[in-house]
Image (cartoon, rainbow, N blue to C red):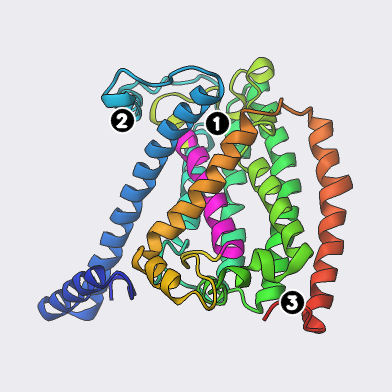
């Protein structure tokens, strides 16, 4: 079928009807090809809509933190401001830059956008609302999300600009360093869950105290906090925005980019923030599962009425708000402070934490 949907029922009926209609009109391979194209279009649309929504939300939350209004002119409460900015960036001229490596220069934004798109497509947005459900889903997310650093390094090196090159080198050092902590945090929960498949990880977190954040005791809490820190650093957002430090490097690795090319980097940054929060929701906070408490049957029935995708986006939204709160609260770190935090503190803690979690699982000391 187009998507394996078990909830909501209406969407399941729609996809089942579309699948049966296509198969009655053409061979199976043709029906599958059309379904793949439709899924790709839906993902692209969702990608753009979520990015535009996050841009508007961040502007409003930032304004609240800084005691101002934020966007308030284009549309009611400025709600169409992001759309207007998107139209503007699509119409902007792409300024040709002399003495650049043209192939790598134009290829770099696509590495960044494709990497975030591949990761975005594997997130389980609801009960059955996923495009792919690999049995190594957690490993897949770590692998494809790492591809974006190739685009950043290509952008810095091919731009023939010292500021771009310094920004790319900073980003490479930062991303590779914090990728270790992010991966080890996720592996800690993989040890607890006994599976790398995202749907299996979510289905094992039925009740609130079965969420991996709680059932793994202190090691799971430590892994959660470290993952949020490392994930935030991987998105190059303050206080970890050294690769784009405006006061030092103008715009960092994308200094020489303009128009739609710059827009690719801009969109990927916001989607990466959503992806980090979405992975944390899936792995630590029960994913699409509603808030349920064993024995509270009436309460659980009410919670079940809320669609699974609403729960996923609500939990993800809370983590995104936390990310924005951190960005607009703490000052930017120096590059040596940033790397010291990872290599001298987070990584050793993570390694010990992984061993402790393995001991808990071996001796059955976690909540079952």
Q: In the picture, residue 311 is in which quadrant? A: bottom left
Q: Is residue 339 above or below residue 353?
A: above
Is residue 355 toward the left or the right of residue 55 in the image? right
Residue 268 versus residue 311: which sits nearer the camera? Answer: 311
> What is the secondary structure assignment of the residue under circle 2?
helix
The residue that appears at 36% across and 63% down in the rendered structure is 306
Q: Earlier in the sequence, mark 2 or mark 1?
A: 2
| Residue 237 in sight | no
Viewer-nearest residue: 273 or 86: 273
> Disc 3 vs disc 1: Cβ atoms closer than 8 Å?
no
Residue visible at 47% across and 56% down in the picture: 118
Residue 233: quarter of image: top right
Q: Is residue 320 left or right of residue 189?
A: left
The part of the chain drawn in magenta is 265-285
Helix, strand or loop at disc 1? loop
Mark 3 element type: loop
Residue 149 screen position, x and y as percent? 62, 44
- Which disc is residue 352 wearing? none
- Label whose residue precedes the other's in the sequence (3 or 1): 1
> Residue 56's x, y, as percent?
41, 31
Which residue lies under the disc numbered 1?
Answer: 101
Q: Residue 302 placed where, x, y %?
A: 38, 67
Q: Position of residue 96 (x, y in %)?
A: 44, 21
Q: Which residue is mark 3?
A: 366
Q: Kindly identify which residue carries mark 2.
A: 83
With respect to residue 281, does 199 lie above or below?
below
Label 2 Cα neighbours within 10 Å, binned few <14 / some 14-19 / many ≥20: some
Q: In this rendering, does residue 307 appear at all?
A: yes
Quadrant where the C terminus lies?
A: bottom right
Could you tell me if the residues under marks 3 and 2 are in contact, i.e. CB atoms within 8 Å?
no
């Amino acid at each position: 079928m187009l998507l394996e949907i078990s909830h909501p029922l209406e969407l399941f009926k729609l996809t089942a009807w579309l699948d049966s209609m296509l198969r009655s009109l053409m061979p199976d391979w043709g029906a599958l090809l059309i379904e793949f194209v439709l899924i790709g279009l839906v993902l692209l649309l969702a990608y753009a809509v979520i990015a535009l929504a996050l841009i508007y939300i961040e502007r409003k939350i930032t304004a609240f933190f800084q005691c101002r209004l934020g966007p308030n002119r284009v549309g009611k409460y400025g709600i169409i401001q992001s759309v207007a900015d998107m139209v503007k960036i699509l119409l902007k001229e792409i300024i040709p830059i002399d003495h650049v490596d043209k192939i790598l220069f134009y290829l770099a934004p696509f590495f960044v956008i494709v990497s975030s798109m591949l990761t975005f497509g594997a997130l389980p947005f609801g009960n059955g609302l996923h495009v792919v459900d690999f049995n190594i889903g957690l490993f897949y997310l770590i692998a494809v999300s790492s591809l974006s650093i190739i685009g950043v390094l290509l952008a810095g090196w091919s731009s023939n600009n010292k500021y771009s090159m310094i920004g790319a080198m900073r980003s490479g050092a930062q991303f590779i360093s914090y990728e270790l902590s992010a991966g080890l945090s996720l592996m800690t929960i993989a040890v607890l869950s006994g599976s790398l498949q995202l749907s299996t990880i979510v289905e094992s977190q039925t009740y609130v105290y079965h969420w991996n954040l709680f059932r793994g005791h202190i090691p799971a809490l430590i892994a959660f906090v470290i993952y949020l820190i490392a994930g935030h650093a991987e998105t190059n957002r303050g206080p970890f925005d050294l690769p784009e430090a405006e006061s030092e490097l103008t715009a960092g690795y994308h200094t020489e980019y303009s128009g739609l090319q710059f827009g690719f980097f801009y969109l990927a940054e916001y989607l990466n923030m959503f992806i980090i929060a979405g992975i944390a929701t899936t792995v630590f906070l029960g994913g699409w599962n509603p808030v349920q408490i064993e024995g509270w049957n009436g309460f659980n029935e009410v919670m079940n009425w809320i669609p699974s995708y609403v729960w996923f986006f609500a939990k993800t939204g809370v983590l995104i708000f936390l990310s924005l709160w951190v960005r607009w609260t703490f000052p930017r770190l120096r590059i040596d402070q940033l790397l010291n935090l990872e290599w001298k503190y987070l990584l050793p803690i993570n390694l010990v934490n992984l061993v402790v979690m393995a001991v808990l699982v071996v001796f059955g000391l976690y909540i079952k």
